[in-house]
């Protein structure tokens, strides 16, 4: 069998149903095999788009996302998506064509050392040197991508080798890699100690992250939180892992987190970190982070434990396996829940005095926060929401109120502008029956707008709600607050006419400039068949609050100026 | 009640272990003998900001496995974090942070020293004291091979430098655990 065909067979054996990609010279044999392959191939318009679509697909479904690209520029275009998948631990397999073996190292046409270039951004990578390796490497790549702390795996195949003829033997046996054995169970004794520490805590908080989503452990998290009245906060990546409607939910923490979540972390005597990694956007000034707290850190990746913040009780394991054990141990201690009364009193006080706040718009002005609230109502809070990166991303995180896991898909670690639209494509392909919306920024959307063509030609009915403030808003906010309002290269007022642009692509274009009409217009957009791009004109110079200024501690957080108050 | 688990865990009794050991560490790393493995290890060190003092790579008794021996300063880098990051590399099989008292560590160095007729005898004497070998003699220089701990090599360097050190090459340390296991 031709090696390229064994690649398709191998992907099929891994359960692959969808692949995103773009052909080129060095992956011609692969694309010839795609014609007869058993999966749907979604033809993207730029390799970065294909890569983010694979990520969105994975994040919405929990399955491994797959993208193809050719050698050289095809492969280098993919790199942003690979780095993004690494930072957000997204299980993905990227398969690139490479120049033929005899040309490797000669600076041949469309040659790029993609293996070398991606070394810092991959969980692992393979370059095929013998076509018979293909089935084996695919099998190993999927295993590595999906297990342990998930991440991207690159498979680079020289074009002469994908044309070769080999005997195909399906690889289905369990993968045995001597240097890769993630521990998943969690040390029983450590879990017991953790339960006891929790029983002795007066001011505990559960600080959860994307690991809860990756591990499909929302149910287990709810059980743990419910075993006592533990307050719960989450990182940007963990939103939806715990229902926002719960009265134990404090909202997101970190740079643009809620006052109550950040103050609870600051005053806590015990932080239970669950699948979260104490990123600088969470801790702010590290030396002043959570000064009173002892730390229980549960993570599948031992290297995350005590990397940024020291863990007093480290537990290495899959949170899905560890949390039920911790809940059981904790329940067995039959702790008196009333010890948390004083703690909850403080928290309720912060919540009442410092809720999320924005000054309401006047005369039909659409406040960006209002836009997200309207989107929540229009979608009944049930949509899968992707976003780009910037103010609109933070407002969506603050105001949408995610109830379920895998419904919030954004670029958290790398912060990739232009992520939202292709990620929505992937999410919609993975979940054809769900409403998939992309909340975009006008600075971000244009970075991958070409993927609107993918939506149209592949009939992927994502609804894009563009939060259009005429600026690259988050950068403008920083220039306003920290750079003396010297605006530099943030003006986006020269953007195209988005409605006409959508129509030029063959999608439906809409515009809304009045708050009173917004929700109705959104419902109409959601009911429209096929892809829709709605240009929503929001307040131009609104700032995203609350905010912990960079390099500051939680207690230095700045809130939105309130009307009538100071 | 499992042995070793205290009845009650008081939060104030929980303490963090120190991150920095303050001494030199020798890491003995077994890796799969595959293309690109050294690049992965070296790349990890550079991107995490870990500074390698010495590095030696060679085969082991098993042709499919290579050994990387590297030394780094535990006063600057949290060794625990270094080894955990290394363990994330799929091709890294085993890492041993060699205990100084239980380890035999050796390095080899070649010194090319200017040796005029009048100081030649003195250099030969140094070599004897250090149990070094003279491996090449030319009209104006001598080349001396020294094997030993890094300290010994540095001591030898201090002795011959005043005579004119033309060139020095060091291998970086390799190490093996003492005793039977």
Image (tube, coloured by chain):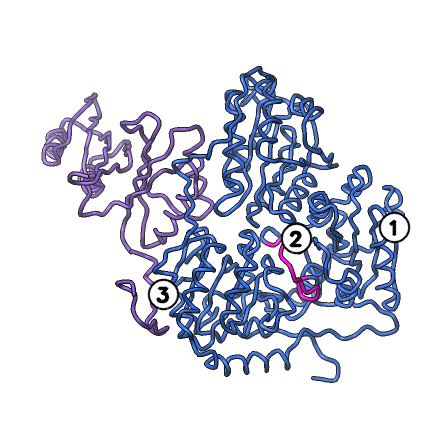
Chain colours: A blue, B purple
Q: Which numbered disc, 2 or 3, marks the residue that appears first in the sequence? A: 3
Asked whether residue A368 is drawn in magenta, I would say: no
Q: Which numbered disc, 1 or 3, marks the residue that appears first in the sequence? A: 3
Mark 1 belongs to which subunit? Answer: A
Q: Residue at x 80, y 58 (%)?
A: A468
Q: Which numbered disc, 1 or 2, marks the residue that appears first in the sequence? A: 2
Secondary structure type for disc 2? strand
Q: Residue at x 29, y 65 (%)?
A: B1
Residue A205 coordinates in the image, percent (x, y): 50, 70
- Label 1 neighbour load within 10 Å: few <14, some 14-19, many 20+: many
Q: Is residue A483 above or below residue A558?
A: above
Mark 2 belongs to which subunit? Answer: A
Res. A447 mark:
none
Q: Are marks 1 and 3 on the same chain?
A: yes
**A78 to the left or right of A512:** left
Secondary structure type for disc 1? strand
Mark 3 belongs to which subunit? Answer: A
**A324 to the left or right of A390:** left
C-alpha separation, residue under disc 1 versus residue under disc 2 = 23 Å
Foreground residue among A227 and A83:
A227
Kindly report the secondary structure that dominates the magenta region of the rendered protein.
loop
Res. A193 mark:
3
Q: Which residues are magenta?
A: A397-412
Secondary structure type for disc 3? helix
């Amino acid at each position: 069998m031709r090696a390229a065909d064994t690649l398709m067979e191998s992907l099929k054996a891994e359960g692959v149903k969808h692949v995103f990609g773009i052909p080129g010279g060095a992956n011609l044999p692969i694309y010839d095999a795609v014609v007869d392959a058993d999966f749907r191939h979604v033809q993207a318009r730029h390799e970065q788009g294909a890569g983010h679509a694979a990520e969105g697909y994975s994040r919405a479904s929990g399955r491994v996302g797959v993208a193809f690209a050719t050698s050289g520029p095809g492969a280098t275009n993919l790199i942003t998506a690979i780095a993004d998948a690494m930072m957000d631990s997204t299980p993905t397999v990227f398969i690139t064509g490479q120049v033929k073996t005899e040309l490797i190292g000669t600076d041949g046409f469309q040659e790029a050392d993609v293996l070398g270039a991606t070394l810092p951004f991959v969980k692992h990578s393979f370059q095929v040197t013998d076509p018979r390796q293909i089935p084996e490497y695919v099998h190993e790549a999927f295993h590595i991508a999906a297990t342990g702390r998930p991440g991207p795996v690159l498979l680079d195949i020289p074009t002469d080798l994908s044309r070769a003829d080999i005997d195909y033997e399906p690889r289905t046996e369990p993968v045995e890699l001597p240097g890769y054995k993630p521990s998943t169970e969690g040390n029983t004794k450590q879990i017991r100690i953790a339960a006891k520490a929790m029983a002795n805590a007066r001011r505990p908080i559960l600080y959860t992250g994307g690991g809860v989503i990756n591990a499909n452990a929302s149910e287990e998290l709810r059980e743990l939180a419910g075993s006592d009245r533990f307050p719960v906060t989450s990182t940007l990546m963990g939103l939806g892992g715990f229902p926002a409607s719960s009265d134990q939910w404090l909202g997101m923490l970190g740079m643009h987190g809620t006052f109550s979540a950040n103050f609870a972390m600051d005053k806590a005597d015990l932080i239970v970190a669950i699948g979260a990694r104490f990123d600088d956007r969470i801790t702010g000034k590290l030396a002043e982070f959570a000064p009173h707290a002892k730390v229980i850190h549960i993570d599948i990746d031992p290297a995350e434990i005590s990397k940024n913040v020291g863990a007093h009780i480290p537990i290495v394991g899959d949170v899905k396996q560890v949390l039920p054990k911790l809940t059981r141990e904790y329940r067995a201690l039959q702790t008196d829940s009333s010890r948390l009364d004083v703690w909850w009193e403080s928290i309720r006080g912060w919540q009442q005095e410092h809720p999320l706040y924005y000054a309401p718009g006047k005369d039909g002005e659409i406040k960006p926060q209002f836009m997200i609230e309207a989107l929540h109502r229009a979608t009944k809070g049930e949509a899968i929401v992707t976003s780009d990166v910037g103010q609109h991303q933070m407002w969506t995180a603050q105001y949408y109120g995610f109830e379920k896991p895998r419904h919030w898909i954004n670029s958290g670690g790398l912060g990739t502008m232009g992520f939202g639209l292709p990620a929505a494509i992937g999410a919609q392909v993975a979940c054809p029956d769900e409403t998939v919306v992309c909340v975009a920024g006008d600075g971000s959307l244009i970075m991958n707008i070409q993927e609107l063509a993918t939506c149209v030609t592949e009939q992927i009915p994502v609804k894009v709600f563009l939060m259009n403030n005429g600026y690259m808003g988050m950068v403008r906010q920083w220039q306003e607050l920290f750079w003396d309002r010297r605006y530099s290269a943030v003006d986006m007022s020269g953007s195209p006419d988005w409605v006409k642009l959508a129509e030029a692509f063959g999608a439906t274009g809409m515009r809304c400039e009045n708050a009173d009409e917004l929700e109705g217009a959104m419902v109409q957009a959601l009911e429209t068949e096929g892809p829709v791009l709605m240009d929503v004109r929001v307040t131009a110079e609104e700032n995203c609050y609350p905010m912990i200024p960079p390099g500051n501690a939680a207690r230095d957080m700045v809130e939105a100026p309130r009307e009538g108050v100071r | 009640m499992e042995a070793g688990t205290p009845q009650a865990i008081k939060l104030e009794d929980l303490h963090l272990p120190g991150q920095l050991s303050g001494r030199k560490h020798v890491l003995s790393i077994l890796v799969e003998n595959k293309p690109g493995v050294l690049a992965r290890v070296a790349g990890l060190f550079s991107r995490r900001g870990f500074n390698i003092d010495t590095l030696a790579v060679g085969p082991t008794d098993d042709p499919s496995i290579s050994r990387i021996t590297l030394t780094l300063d535990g006063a600057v880098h949290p060794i625990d974090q270094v080894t955990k990051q290394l363990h994330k590399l799929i091709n890294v099989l085993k890492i041993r942070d060699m205990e100084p008292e239980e380890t035999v560590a050796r390095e080899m160095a070649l010194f090319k020293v200017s040796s005029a007729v009048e100081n030649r005898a003195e250099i030969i004497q140094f070599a004897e004291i250090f149990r070094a070998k003279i491996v090449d003699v030319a009209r104006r220089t001598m080349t001396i091979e020294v094997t030993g701990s890094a300290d010994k090599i540095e001591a030898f360097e201090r002795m011959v430098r005043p005579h004119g050190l033309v060139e020095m090459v060091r291998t970086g340390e390799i190490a093996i655990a003492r005793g039977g296991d």
